[in-house]
Amino acid sequence: MRTAAVIYNPVKVDIDVLREAVNKESAAAGWAESVWFETSVDDVGQNVTGQALAHGVDLVIVAGGDGTVRAVVEAVRGHDVAVALLPSGTGNLLARNLKMTLNDLPDSVRSAFTGEDRTIDLGMIRLEREDKTREEHAFVVMAGAGLDAKMITNTDEDLKKKAGWLAYVRAIVASLRDPDELHVQFCLDNGLAKRATVHTLILGNCGSLPANILLMPEAVLDDGLFDVMMTRPGGALGWIRVWVKVAWTNGIVRRTKAGKALAGEHQNDTDLHYETGAEFTARFSRPEEIELDGDAFGKAVAFKAWIEPSKLRMRIPRTSE
């Protein structure tokens, strides 16, 4: 009999409700009793996932926010085990981009045991700290520096628990007051080294955010590439232009086939610039805040990021025949 491991964040889930749903669906699908692992402040998912894999489980079910998902995926890397999501956080970024149901726990649990697998790309990043130490991490949605990372750092976690995604609005306002721009020397794939001064630098494996925001309209989870977005709006009008492009043109118009044809191809300018690639290196003029999948990862002076194509097997709802 196949066995699933449930990695859950006790802050994000009602464990009694979750356990009842998992026991019901695993029995209905003919699986053995699941094994359970709880994350903590000291272990956000990597170690307990390693313990689960040591049990030889056939499926890893993640019940938690984006940070828990990222940590579990990082530990699953290199193992041929599918990962199922039970969306439980504020953003649920990977679940959104996989077009999964966000607010139906019974349906999500059922899909974990009866769904089908889809392979997607995995982002990897090697951070270099100011003391020259280096560390590697995985990301499934986005890696960012500049305004994007400062927004994560400025987010009030207590307010986030109460107000959800709206808590980021306050963080954005605080970040916009920071006059420091990002001075970066970068290289995409095997191209020439370039220099840029930007407010935001983001590498995206996928592009949908809450509030119907499509940050990277061409990003695809399984194309072997990530999309690079750099912004440097010129004053208030520049920020308005960026917001119109991201929230209206990308978030509304480009979501339909007719809308894509109407909008046409994106034209890069000084406000908003997109590129694609499989490897990206960057070095900053000073230590800069870094975020991965919506979590702060401290400051780095440089990084190297790359895509590992079709590295991750995700369990998604079975499509109708």
Image: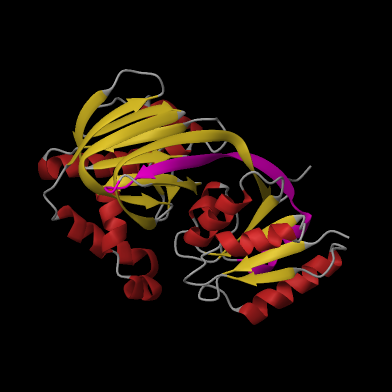
- In the image, residue 77 sits, relative to residue 222, either above or below, namely below
Magenta span contains residue 137: no
**Number of labelled discs?**
0
Q: Is residue 171 left or right of residue 19?
A: left
Q: Is residue 227 left or right of residue 290?
A: right
Q: Is residue 214 visible?
A: no
Residue drawn at (52%, 61%), measured in percent from left and top?
Answer: 68
Q: Which quadrant of the figure has residue 85?
A: bottom right
Q: Which quadrant of the figure has residue 33?
A: bottom right
Quick one: quadrant of the C terminus? top right
Magenta span contains residue 130: yes
Quick one: 177 or 51, which is closer to the camera?
51
Q: Which quadrant of the figure has residue 259?
A: top left
Residue drawn at (34%, 75%), measured in percent from left and top?
Answer: 158
Q: Is residue 120 left or right of residue 284?
A: right
State which region is magenta. Answer: 104-131
Residue drawn at (48%, 41%), measured in percent from left and top?
Answer: 124
Quick one: quadrant of the N terminus? bottom right
Give the image's coloring scheme.
secondary structure
- In the image, residue 95 sits, relative to residue 231, either above or below, namely below
